[in-house]
Image (tube, rainbow, N blue to C red):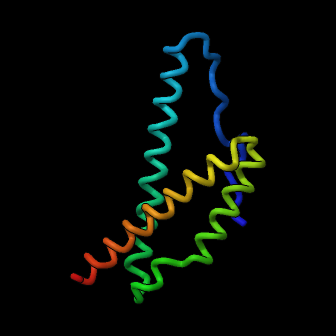
Amino acid sequence: MIKAANMTDTAPLPPMETMTDVRQQVDRIDGELIALMTQRFACMDAAARIKQDRGAVRDEGRKAAVLENVKQLAREAAIPVPTMAAIWEMLIETSISYELQKWDQIRDK
């Protein structure tokens, strides 16, 4: 199982007294999420390069394991499990589509 970053690794949120404060934090967090997604998609680039068989891009066993892991992490974080599972389902499918496109580009298919 993949371990989530310890919540103590993340700086606590500052006090938020106004909607401006809330929106500033949401915008900051969105920026951090985009930076993490950039890293995740770099992993998809590497996977497309490493996998020799296009059929290996879609791995339903790995997909199921990732979804189960995310559900467990969401439970531990006390955030909505069905919501996180739905987000990750879309993320995984998008990642697979992206990786297939990269796989084809690398091999001029």
- Out of 107 and 46, give the one closest to the viewer: 107
Q: Residue extending furthest bottom?
A: 53
Vertical comparison of 28 with 18: above or below:
below
Q: Is residue 91 above or below residue 104?
A: above
Which quadrant is the N terminus positioned in? Answer: bottom right
Looking at the picture, how far across and down is residue 20, in whole percent? Answer: 49, 14
Coordinates of residue 105 in the picture (x, y in percent): 25, 76
Q: Quadrant of the C terminus?
A: bottom left
Give the residue at x 41% y 72%. 46
Q: What number of labels is visible?
A: 0
Q: Is residue 105 left or right of residue 65?
A: left
Q: In the image, residue 52 lies at what x, y percent?
A: 40, 88
> Which residue: 47% across, 84% down?
56
Q: Residue at x 62, y 54 (%)?
A: 85
Residue 103 x, y percent position in the rendering: 33, 77
Task: In the rendered view, tell whether residue 80 sits above or below residue 38.
Answer: above
Furthest residue in direction top, as rendered:
18
Relative vertical location of residue 88 with respect to residue 109 in this rendering, above or below: above
Q: Residue at x 52, y 35 (%)?
A: 29
Quarter-wise, where is residue 16 in the image? top right
Q: Examine the image and state in which quarter residue 102 appears.
A: bottom left
